[in-house]
Amino acid sequence: MTSRSQTLVHNWRLKVSALGLSIFLWALVQTEPTNQETFEAVPVRIQVLDTAWTTSGASAPATVELRLGGPAREIISLAREGTSIRVPIGTIGARDTLITLRREWVQLGQRSGLTVESISPATVRVTFEEAQVRMIPVAMRLAGRVPDHLGMAADIELSPQLVRVRGPQSRLEGLDSLILEPFDLSSISRSGVFAVALDTSGFLGSSVVPPTASLGIRVEGLIERVLDGITVQAVANPVEAAVVADPATIQVRVMGARSIVTALDPSRLRVWVPTDLLLGMMPGEERFVRVQIDGVPALVTAALEPERITVRRVIDQDWGSPEGEGPDGGSDDGRSER
């Protein structure tokens, strides 16, 4: 059996090195220099615990200056991550209140050795207001468009369509919707459900539940379909002579998501000339006009070829001479009555 003395000398060089390293690290910590640093524009965050009240806005001032002391590495770490002053308010004594800031309200995290040397200014003024709870509609804010090789196959589904907002009564009374942060459609590569945060800037003192909404987006491959022989409708006022379209049929190109374009029924398309473009036409008169199209499904674009056509008012035969008679009332063979 190995003796105690043999155990002590076993790997003695490694043990001595470990002991020396431990002593060095202990001495380093003990001799680490302390430092003082000023943190500017530290936000003051008011936390109202009384659910019947909330803040009307930011405190005045909304930020303060902190002077902290402690180990340099801890100060550097805090400066990198940031800090704030959280002010808990249990009961509301007055709508307009001057609050003295306490050092223990400074958020230092789990860092040891840091001390709050000073807070400047030492007080902030906060205005309180009765809180109101409302269900507010959510509105989308879209940017860009889906990539060129894709088409929207359905309307975007927004969920939820209403959110619960608790905030100052004066702000919520005139609020008709909460808008989402902009969502860039050009970032879409496939169908999916995408979470988007609500834009709550300017809603200090308010809470929104849930703070995000989801956009259900369905896309498919983009295709083009050519529809030939679509009749042009040129309907004149009933009291006026008929109008003839030239050409009588045109070509329509439709583009969109594969499933929508494939299912499109050409008989549902209506290509027509607006009646107001035909008003006042004389018999035999021609006009070059733009045609319009109805019946194109949502999310599908249509291009007409040609976009403009010629319309001609027909000559009303009732305006001519009676059948079988010449201009002077004679027969139509040109011979005068004897």
Image: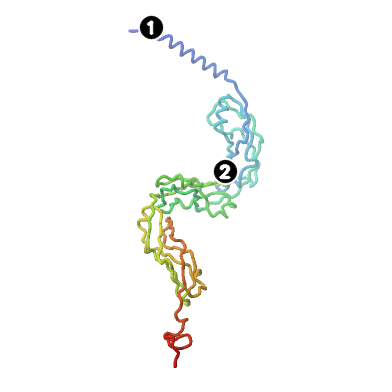
Residue 168: x and y, percent? 58, 50
Indicate whether 85 appears above or below 303. Answer: above
Indicate whether 175 appears above or below 108. Answer: below
Q: Dot 2, how many residues are within 10 Å of its Cα: few (below 14), some (14-19), or many (20+)?
A: some
Q: How is the image coloured?
A: rainbow
SS category of the residue bearing label 1: helix
Question: How much space separates mark 1 and mark 2, taking CA atoms?
Answer: 67 Å
Per the image, the residue denoted by label 2 is 48
The residue located at (60%, 52%) in the rendering is 170
Return the residue nearer the eye: 223 or 134: 223
Residue 83: x and y, percent? 57, 34
Viewer-side label of 1, 2: 1
Residue 153: x and y, percent? 40, 52
Q: Which mark is residue 268?
A: none
The residue located at (48%, 76%) in the rendering is 240
Q: Which mark is residue 6?
A: 1
Indicate whether 275 appears above or below 51. Answer: below
Q: Is residue 23 left or right of residue 44?
A: left
Return the residue nearer the eye: 178 or 147: 147
Q: Is residue 284 left or right of residue 90?
A: left
Q: Dot 1, how many residues are within 10 Å of its Cα: few (below 14), some (14-19), or many (20+)?
A: few
Instruction: Give whichever of discs 1 and 2 has the lower sequence position.
Output: 1
Residue 74: x and y, percent? 56, 26
